[in-house]
Each structure stands twice: as C-alpha cells, then as structure tokens.
Image (spheres, rainbow, N blue to C red):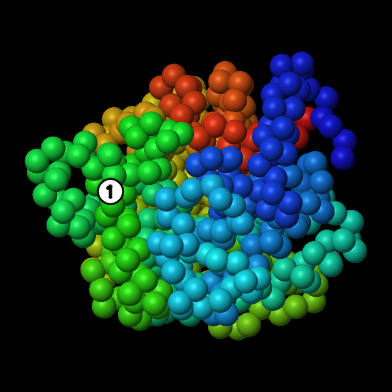
Amino acid sequence: MSVPSLPAELAALRETAVSVLRGNDLGDITRPSPTLYPHQWLWDSCFIAIGLRHLDPQRAAAEILSLLRGQWPNGMIPHVIFAETTNFYHAGPQRWRCDRVTTTAGGAQSTGVTQPPMIAEAAVRVGAMMSDSERGEFYRRLFPGLLRFHQWLYDERDPDDDGLVSLVHSWESGMDNTPTWMEITRPVAPLGVRALRRVNGDDALDALRRDSKEVPSDERLTSGDLFTLYRIVRELRRAHYNFREIRRTIVPLVQDVAFNAILVRANEHLSTIAAEIGEVIPARLRRSARRTREAMGELVVDGVYYSRDFRTRTLLRHETIAGLLPLYAGVVPEDRVDEMVKTITSPRYWSRFGVASVPLDDPNFLPRCYWQGPLWVNMNWLIADGLERYGRLDAAEDLRRNTVDVIASSEAMFEYYSPLDGSGAGSNRFSWTAALLIDLLAADH
C-alpha cells in the first residue's frame, strides 16, 4: 500500500504505530496490548482493522473474520476470545467457564458477554480498500455470521421488542467504569466489599487484585468496583448467560446509549453489505433496526442523551461521552446538532487534546482513571465521523488534529490520555491507538 507523504515527525510517529501493530500481531488476531490485554477483544479488533486496511487490506479482513471463530451457536460474538497464551489475564476462561454452557465456532474459549457491534463499520471500511471481487468474497464470508450476530442482539437482548438492546455487564459497553455504570452496579457489590469499604475504602482490596502489574491501580477502576464486576460474572455464569434467566437475578440491566447508537450505524452498514452481495435482510431485523433508530429519541432530555435502566425505564442521569455517540449514529435531529456540537466543543468536554470521557466539572472526573475522565482515541474517532457526516467539517477536522497531536506529544501509543495535560495513561503499545492514528494520518493526506 502507498504511504502518505508526511512531515518527518509524523512519519516517525506512524512508523511507531506500525511497529506496535506488528508487535501485537499474533497471526490472524491482534492483541490490544502485550501484557494487560493478551487476548482478542471484539471492538478492539474492529478499530485495529480500520487501521490495518491502510497497510494490508487482506490482513485487516482476516482480523474481522477471525472474530467469527468465537461465535456461539446462538449468534453471540463474545467480547473476548481467548488466545493460546500463558500470559495471565485476570478475567480469563476460569472465571467464565463458558465451556460448560456452549462451544464456539472455532473451538476457542471465550467470555459469556458481547461488546459494541463495530464489525459492520470495520468491514465496510476495509471493503472500501479492496477490488470489487475481493470485497465481494470478503462480504460473502462475513455476512452469515454478522447477520446472526445482529439477530441475536434483538432476539436475546430486546425481549420486549422496544428497539433498544440491553447489556448485562459494564464490560459489554466497552466503557467499564463510567459514572453511569458504576451508579447501577455498586448496589450489588458483595457484602465483603461493602464491609471493607466501610473500614478502609478500597485500599484493603488492592492487595487482592492481579490486574495492576503494568498499570497503576489509580488508573483503573477501583478494587471494590472490580470485585463487584466479578460478582456479576458469577451471577451470569449461574444463569447460563441466558437473558431470560439473568432477568430474574440481581444483575443490573442497562439500555446503554452508546451501544445502541453504534448498533444504529451497524444496522445501516449491514444493509450496505447485504445489498452489495445480493442478500436480503430479513423483514423482522429491518423492523428492529427502524425501531432502534426511533427509540433513541426516548433517551434524550433537553438535548442530552442518557442510558436507561431496563427494568425501571429510568434514565441514568450522568453526562458522559456515551451520550455524544447519537451524533455518530446520525439520530440527532438537525435542529439539535449545533447544540450538541457546542456541548462537545465546550471547555467541559474538549480540552485542546480532545473529548474527555466525563465532563471536567463532574464530581466523578479523574483525568487519568480509565473511563472516568481520560480521552480515548476511538471515541474521538467516532465523534469526528459523526461531525463530518453532519457537515460540521471544521469541528471534525479540529478533533482529528487534536487526536494526532496528543499522541504525538507523548510519542507513544497509550491506551488513553489525560485531557488536562495530554499525558499518556493505561497500557502502552496499545493497538487501537496505533491503528486509528494510521487511519487519521491517511485521512489527512
């Protein structure tokens, strides 16, 4: 593939990104990072493929197709498909025991939950780099499994047929510890966690966790929250990962605004893929897709979009970056777009480095703590895409430039960055940061 002509410092930064992707390549899958995330994550692989398409479209296609090896017979594609590695992962197969419930298409072990449905977006982006015949072959290989995944989302996670799918774990949102998810999750904390918190906060639990060898614990969700998420996994396991059984448990159920926004766009891309290869989307799925688009309007109050408690239908009134993704979905009415753009570009969200995951004036804001404040390259990428499709080209260009600048300022591919000073945090040598940087640099030239 041709390499864009770049200034020397950006060309060197691109080479760093390429080196990170090569270092994390395990053959037909790419791990998010070499230590903290040694397996394959669903939406990570999608963002990775979007960058890989500029280096090798066939390798990018293989990254997407490899997700199907983890597909369950019911159609679910898991959020993690475990690689054959001895590297420790704190929520590995032993915590999920999905092998007692089902098998995967490729015989791989997996988790029992999913993640934002970015596959169709990635596929269309990769397909655009291929010849007509290559794209057709790729789409035909992908379509049956992708269709079953979208059908599973509605059949399993929208049992009341209201158009919004429900999530059973914050890991499904991809944004593990946003204030929204922590509000609804903390009430189900194990009794031991609650007792220790009363005595000594989360400090007493830090010695028990094993996920902070590479990353300081203050850059991750708290120990109490982590052990609460482990408890929810245990409840899901006991319910055999079946939503009808899960619904009768203590597990929080959330109609997540970002997940459903991504689904709106994914449904559109699925239709594009089907049309290109002469396939027909079943009428029931087309109807569900329309209902999702319409139902997004139920999540907005005074121009702000929120997630919703599935059981009580109560909006979870925390402003976070998740509420900005309806712009990416294209569901924001035109007469409200400028208001949302004003919110995004206000000092509450947008420092000179990009969009914070939680507003800077929120009492929960922590600039280097996972999804409680840091800016994320993938979120900047999604929001910029929405801005561009709404014709707000200056804002889209500014956001993309800021994103490149914050990566350049650290000279490293960090998992996330402080919106206050641009310093990198979380895991280093992070694949989707590298991949999306390559994509952003290609778009600029």
In the image, residue 14 lies at what x, y percent?
72, 28
Circle 1 is placed at which residue position?
A: 225
Helix or strand or loop: what does disc 1 sit on? Answer: helix
Up/down of 313 relative to 29, above or below: below
Left or right, 122 with respect to 54, comes to left
In the image, residue 369 lies at what x, y percent?
36, 34
Amino acid at pointer 1: Asp
Instruction: Look at the image and tell me in which quarter the N terminus lies.
Output: top right
Up/down of 287 relative to 52, above or below: below
Q: Nearer the viewer, residue 54 or 205?
A: 205
What is the residue that sits farthest to the bottom in this orientation? 283
* Residue shown at the point (43%, 26%) measured from the top left: 418
Within-10-Å neighbours for mark 1: few <14, some 14–19, many 20+: many
The answer to whether residue 52 shows anywhere in this view is yes
Left or right, 120 with respect to 340, comes to right
* Residue shown at the point (21%, 36%) measured from the top left: 203
* Residue shown at the point (74%, 44%) measured from the top left: 52
Q: Nearer the viewer, residue 118 or 287?
A: 118
Q: Nearer the viewer, residue 180 or 105?
A: 105
* Residue shown at the point (42%, 50%) measured from the top left: 90
What is the residue that sits farthest to the top in this orientation? 8
Up/down of 373 relative to 111, above or below: above
